[in-house]
Image (cartoon, rainbow, N blue to C red):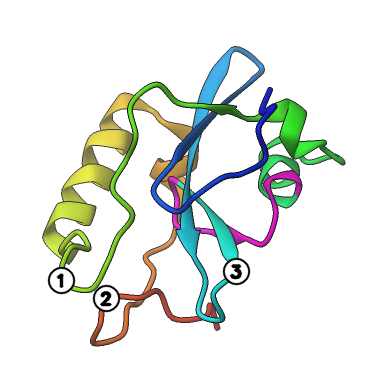
Amino acid sequence: MIEDRNIKPGQRLVGRYHKQEYHAIVVEGPTGGLRYRLDDGREFGSPSAAGTAITGKASNGWAFWSLAEAPAHAPEEGNCPTEDEMAEEARLAAEAGHPVLAEAPARQRDAQGHYLPRS
């Protein structure tokens, strides 16, 4: 459960559902607001929407997610993973049977490394 709602970009969130662990990273959106990016690259405008995407039903994101122990680095220009790194991560996830990453379609990025909207 997240008690301090003063979340900042770069913080990692962890949630459990049906004995499986899920992760999200808090990133800054294009208009300056916060976005919640799941491991598969999908982004949501609230922790509740991100939790609902995992559970498939309405979710109180502040109760679903907890702050992960180690802070993560929010992607910034020049610090985003390369396509090869993302492909390797997806390959390893598929081999391990991770249901979210193994089934995630590839996302396109712009020249600055930001995700483009899904078509």
Q: Secondary structure at mark 2?
A: loop
User: Label 3 is placed on what type of residue?
Assistant: Gly
> Does residue 49 show up magenta in the picture?
no
* Label disc, if present, on residue 35 of the rendered structure: none
Asked where in the image residue 58 lies, by quadrant, the reply is: top right
Up the image or down, 21 lies above or below 42; here it is above
User: Label 1 is placed on what type of residue?
Assistant: Gly
Gap in angstroms between the C-alphas marked 2 and 1:
7 Å
Q: Residue at x 33, y 54 (%)?
A: 74
Q: Residue at x 39, y 42 (%)?
A: 102
In this figure, which residue is indicated by the disc labeled 2? 113
Q: Nearer the viewer, residue 59 or 91?
A: 59
Q: Quadrant of the N terminus?
A: top right
User: Label 2 is placed on what type of residue?
Assistant: Gly
In this figure, which residue is indicated by the disc labeled 3? 33
Crowding at dot 1, Cα within 10 Å, few <14 / some 14-19 / many 20+, comes out as few
Q: Are marks 2 and 1 in contact (CB under 8 Å)?
A: yes
In this figure, which residue is indicated by the disc labeled 1? 78
| Magenta-drawn segment | 39-48
Q: Secondary structure at mark 3?
A: loop
What type of secondary structure mainly makes up the magenta span? loop
Q: Residue at x 43, y 45 (%)?
A: 39
Where does residue 101 sit, x and y in percent of width and height? 41, 43
The mark nearer the N terminus, 2 or 3, is: 3
Where does residue 7 sit, x and y in percent of width and height? 56, 45
**In front: label 2 or label 3:** 3
**In front: label 2 or label 1:** 1
Where does residue 87 sit, x and y in percent of width and height? 21, 54
**In front: label 1 or label 3:** 3
Gap in angstroms between the C-alphas marked 1 and 3:
21 Å
Asked where in the image residue 48 lies, by quadrant, the reply is: top right
The mark nearer the N terminus, 2 or 1, is: 1
